[in-house]
Image (tube, grey):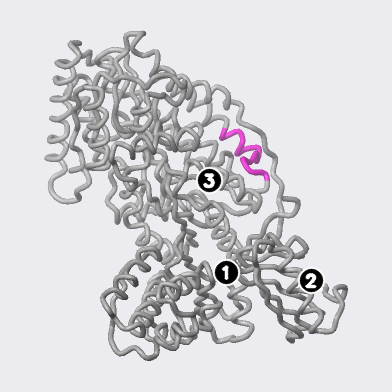
Amino acid sequence: MTTQVKYKSKPLDCWQWGKELRLEAYQDLIAGHEQGKLMVLGCAATPYGILAGLGDFVFLAGEPYGASIAADPPFSIPCMEAYEAKGYSRDMCGYMRNFVGSMYLDKYYFTGGPFPKFDFAWSVRHCPAGHPKWHQIVSEYQGFPMNYIDDETMLSADGDPEHRIEYVAGQYIDSIEWMEKVTGRTFDDEKAIEAMRNYFRNEALWGEVSLLNGAVPAPLDIKSMFALMPIAMLRRHEKVATQFLETLKDEMKDRIANQIAAVPTERYRMTMLTPPPWSFLKIFRYLENFGVVFVGTYVYLINSGEVKFLLDEDKVIPATVPEERPGWPQIKNREDLCRTVARWRTEHPFQSHLDTRKKEFVIIFHHWNGDAYLLLLNRGCVPMTTSMYDFQRDLQQHGIPVAMFEGNFADCRDIDETGVLDRLEAFLEGQGIQKLQGF
Amino acid sequence: MITAGIDMGAQVVKVVILNDGRVLARSMAPTGFEPLEAAQKALDEAIKQAKISRDDIKTIVSTGAGRKAVTFADKVLTEVTADAKGTTWLQPSVRTIIDIGAEEARGISCDAEGRVLDFAKNDKCAAGSGAFVETMARALEVKVPEMIELSFKSTKEAPINATCAVFAESEVVSLIHAKVEKADIAHAIHDAIASRVSSMVRRIPIEKDIALIGGVANNAAIVDVMKKHH
């Protein structure tokens, strides 16, 4: 493969706006208390728009904070060491180790000031045992209460889904009463409904934006997607996120129409299943020297975003919001809201069974016009690494080339950078891809 | 056309000079801490053997862990590609290659043209490599050739279960203290290496013929146990 096409390229027009929105979300965590906002800790997959029923709030999702620290080894390593000094082992969740270490050091990454203080933790039980235990450490250290929604039952393919929806919806209703009790605030159903409408809309928009990257050349590369994703992940409940994502979507359509590429030398398209090692983002820049563009990762298509997989048709399409789906009721009150959230979660690809997920990996690969997958054996996240060899085999059986490497998405000490680049270079050579001339 | 290939390995740099596919000369030199100088020295030696001048060489291709250090090379190839091309050139029936070098082991699946179909490599672990063999020989207080001879005299199985070179060394020390015969320990060491490498290679499709290459392929004891594992 020696043909070298050079596409037009330019930075995103909305890039600066995106950066500002992202920073605002993190800075809010420092000024939040002074502004009378509730400070809430949870997992990124939590439908935290519900919290708007209690008034203004700031929600810190642990994962993106852990990832942000991971991208900066001089900050991350002392955090890891502070965590390990408390007697915790090095093989636990990498995000958690960065997060909790930052708390022990009382250093907040985005300002260098003290670590935020939370009013309570409220979350879905993402990563069944891991995240609640993580938040428990923070809760016991800072002395705040925590409440969790057990929605792992959604993963079951057996039994009547109505029972599961009722089980989970009931927990949301109970947890709202719990939040009223611990905050002393009265819950405003209307505000929660409005914020959750934004949340659903923004998830669908982020999914749609991600799907647009199926165009050749790709209008956005994975690095830019990672940089903009915190808006979808942390500000899903806000109108401003809708405005931004609509603008981004329009700009991507414009780039597609005018063949404006994220990587002007694009000639080989790779996709991922998981987050990357955050301290090693240069891997993407390095591979651009070979004309490789990374067009997306499955995990952020369905975590912060929502799409609709049509498994029987081998297709993926943008998701609609619940109230626009046939047979779904309008949300009029708290019960409707909790039931809609529970039902929405049952159908969300985030909850896909592993066998379904394998089909989705293949569908999104073809939608993104991929040439190969890059898989990470992630020492920093056991759930994300479980079944990785099974996934590799399944993808290869579908004729999809797969490169795999070992590393850690949150601990730079677990990555042999030279070895990984060497491995990828060998993989690309096998695919007939050599370093481009002039690089 | 005269061409030269330089394999800048972790311990040894190997050079071969070809004239239209026929081997004119070969040489080896320790890589040491000055890989560029080592490559130059090995190339000079091969040029001398081939009775040619440097200007006669039209293309120089480098490969190996230190391939990028060979700044005078015209082309650079990864070891995986070079293994597949080189092995199938020598043995066209080979479809699976197991390369055990000083620091790294890898398995490669390839087609008849020497194109790489899939490969697997050990990650940050010396337990299936030449360095491991040397470390274990030191633990047994014998030289590597002696350890190979001892291995063939083994009469009993001795377990080495660790998947890490450091812990495996500790197990060897425990076996020595338990008065297990050196021959049995030597065999257990070779069996452990073969087991690590084989389990890694099973990640790729294994098709016959299988070739074992790399410095460790000179270790007859490893070859013997590898045959049992495959």
From the viewer's perspective, tell me whether residue A343 is left or right of residue A265.
left
Residue at 56%, 52% in the rendered image = A269
* Residue A322 found in image quarter: top left
| Above/below status of B70 relative to B48 | above
Look at the image and give the residue range highlighted in magenta: A252-264
Circle 3 SS class = strand
> In the image, residue A225 lies at what x, y percent?
51, 37
From the viewer's perspective, tell me whether residue B126 is left or right of residue A44.
right
Residue at 60%, 69% in the rendered image = B11
Between the C-alphas of marks 1 and 2, the distance is: 20 Å
Give the letter of the chain under mark 2. Answer: B
Give the letter of the chain under mark 1. Answer: B
> In the image, residue A308 lies at what x, y percent?
36, 42
Which of the numbered marks, if any, corresponds to residue A295? 3
Q: Amino acid at mark 2?
A: Thr
Of discs 3 and 2, which sits in the foreground? Answer: 2
Circle 2 SS class = strand
**Magenta run includes residue A255:** yes
Q: Amino acid at mark 3?
A: Val
